[in-house]
Image (cartoon, rainbow, N blue to C red):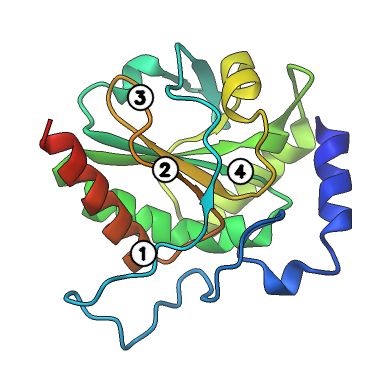
Amino acid sequence: MKKKLTAMVCLLGLSAAFLAGCGGGATESSTPGSADSSTTSSAPVDKGPKTTTNFSELGQFNMETIDGKAFTSDDLKGHKLTLVNLMGTFCNPCIAEMPDLEKLNQEMKDKGVQVIGVVVDTTDGGKDVPESIEKAQKIKKETGVTYPLCKPDDVILGQVLKGVTTFPSSYLVDENGKVVGEGYAGARTFDQWKDIVNSALAQVESK
């Protein structure tokens, strides 16, 4: 898997300046952490490009964080929504987005929302990739995020990551791991994510 991801990054080198994510299909015009100052709470926020969702629920996963702690399906319980952010240590837009995701995680926790990151290049063929784990730990420290950064297990690799061509790609799931709304390709600002999450919360709470 690591070889495939590395090859993808190389191929994207020429077009990276025009993308909001590492991969085809993302055309976000704003950069992470730099919301347009003209945006107001009453104005609609551009939610940006979507990505194909090849799954309807996460299934029973059992991941481990880059810090060696467990993060399983049970950790979704008690949260109305979990934002699952698929990212890689090779992906600059992924890293640039992380402070905004941390802000979202902190400001919306009282509404039952949490954020988790899945660092896709920390495993290869089911085995840990030490250099990528070390890089992810450094990135976590530098960005100041407190939400879990997880190593994908077989369930996430086989069910969620299958078919994903853009990083970051993100999905909102309910406490049972079922996908709410659409998948989102590319990085977004805090205001964009807040708008997306509030819309999804309204959807969940109306059931």
Q: Residue furthest top?
A: 60
Residue 103 location, x and y as percent?
Answer: 33, 58
Per the image, label 2 sits on a secondary structure element best described as loop
Above or below, 96 relative to 106: below
Amino acid type of the residue tagged 2 in the rendering: Glu
Count numbered badges in the picture: 4
Amino acid type of the residue tagged 4 in the rendering: Gln
Q: Residue furthest left?
A: 206
Q: Residue furthest bottom?
A: 38
Mark 1 or 3 closer to N-term? Answer: 3
Disc ID at residue 192: 1
Of marks 2 and 3, the one in the foreground: 2
Disc ID at residue 83: none
Residue 55 location, x and y as percent?
Answer: 50, 25
Please give the name of the residue rendered at 12% of the width and 30% of the height, measured from the top-left corner.
207
Q: CA distance from mark 2 to mark 3?
A: 11 Å
Residue with the mark numbered 3:
178
Looking at the figure, which quarter contains the N terminus? top right
Q: CA distance from mark 4 to mark 2?
A: 29 Å
Closer to us: 13 or 135? 13
Of marks 1 and 4, the one in the foreground: 1
Give the left or right position of residue 101, taking residue 110 as reference.
right
Closer to us: 80 or 150? 80
Amino acid type of the residue tagged 3 in the rendering: Lys
Q: CA distance from mark 1 to mark 2?
A: 14 Å
Q: CA distance from mark 3 to mark 4?
A: 29 Å
Residue with the mark numbered 2:
182
Please give the name of the residue rendered at 86% of the width and 69% of the height, measured from the top-left corner.
14
Amino acid type of the residue tagged 1 in the rendering: Gln
Q: CA distance from mark 1 to mark 3?
A: 22 Å
Of marks 1 and 2, the one in the foreground: 2
